[in-house]
Amino acid sequence: MSHQVVATRFSIVFPFVVLLLAGCATTPEPPLALVIPVFPPPPAEPRFIYERTIRYNEDVEGPDRAERFRRFATGAPREVLGLVKPYDVAVFEGRVYVTDTVQREVFLFDVPGGRFREIGKEKPGLLVKPIGIDISSTGTLYVCDVSARRIMAYDLEGTFLHSIGDDKTLSRPSDIAVSPDGALVYVVDVGGVDSDQHHIQVFDAASGNLLNTIGKRGSADGEFNLPIQATVAHDGTLYVVDKGNFRVQAFDAAGKFKRTFGTAGRMPGQFFSPKGIATDNDGNVYVVDTAFGNFQIFNDQGELLLYVGDRGQSGAPAKYLLPAGIDVDKDGRVYVVDQFFRKIDVFRPAGLDANAGYHGTR
């Protein structure tokens, strides 16, 4: 068969095939637009914008040239490490530290540095069950180990420094908060059904000595029923989530009761299962409610300003089933942990450009 015949047959058949395919094809639907959650939703002016979700080491670090060559040469897959049951989060200049109660360690997601690191896997800084976490203004990382009944202190790279507390001073430590100057360490002791040790233990950060005990079991002002987490504002005010009493209590640096806000209920401004807590540069208080699947933002007098997030089965941005810890960085970005969906959602203040701050895309 000559090339001329082949070409002729192709020229006859090809238009027919094109017409046939065109007749069978349907007009493709346009792709669904990606809706970025904003809070409050339109038409209100936005205050916070969903920015990103962190789950795995690959979310912050990319393979360098040597790693890419090794994988190409050997065919080896890249090791992916991620969260299994995250609990609490603390952020220092773009570095996100997350406790994982199942994997028994702290994960460092260094966003500006493009690094991932594991902390607490080796003695003498070995962790048993880390839950609460905080970072001092001077860069000391404190991790609350509920099973070991002590507070573990590390530098920002995860090098163990020392421990605070023991089974004589702590019963069921659940969280830690550090004073603005780094001198005082407040440890939440959650107690239990059969325990009267529902209080805050105050330690000297340098010596580790127990200085004071704030509160006791009860429902009166300054008393606690299953305190769970705490934070310290820039003015030194200590805020404690009093979970069993469905409220947040505020104390001065010496432990004197200042005020309380919140009641039991299902309406905005109320609490059903409060858990994580944080404050921002303006003194606003952020409280996670596991039952609501959101976090609520209050001013320093306990007046509700906004709530962010909702319950959801998909694990999509701003959807939660078991939200737990929360933190707010110096840029005003908010980081909220969800245990069920194994993630940290990050929200950016609407007034902060995406290219600005420690997480800015430079």
Image: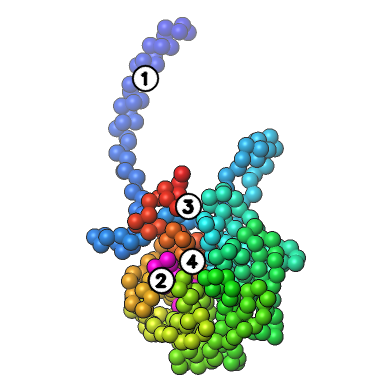
User: Which residue is the site of mark 4?
Assistant: 327
* Camera-side mark, 4 or 2: 2
- Name which of mark 2 and mark 3 comes first in the sequence: 2
Query: In the figure, is residue 21 to the left or right of 357?
Result: left
Q: Secondary structure at mark 3?
A: loop
In the picture, residue 44 is in which quadrant? Answer: bottom left
Work out whether residue 271 or residue 358 is closer to the camera in this orientation and state it: 358
C-alpha separation, residue under disc 4 versus residue under disc 2? 13 Å
Query: Would you say residue 257 is visible in this rendering?
Result: yes
The reply to whether discs 4 and 2 touch (Cβ–Cβ < 8 Å) is: no
For image coordinates 65% across by 62% down, the residue present is: 155
User: Which residue is the site of mark 3?
Assistant: 359
x and y percent of residue 34 in the render? 36, 50
Work out whether residue 15 or residue 135 is closer to the camera in this orientation and state it: 135
- Name which of mark 4 and mark 2 comes first in the sequence: 2
User: Which residue is the site of mark 1?
Assistant: 13
Using a 10 Å C-alpha cutoff, classify the residue at mark 1 as few (fewer than 14 neighbours), some (14 to 19) or many (20 or more).
few
The relative height of residue 28 versus residue 87 in the rendered view (above or below) is above
Which region shows up in magenta?
274-285
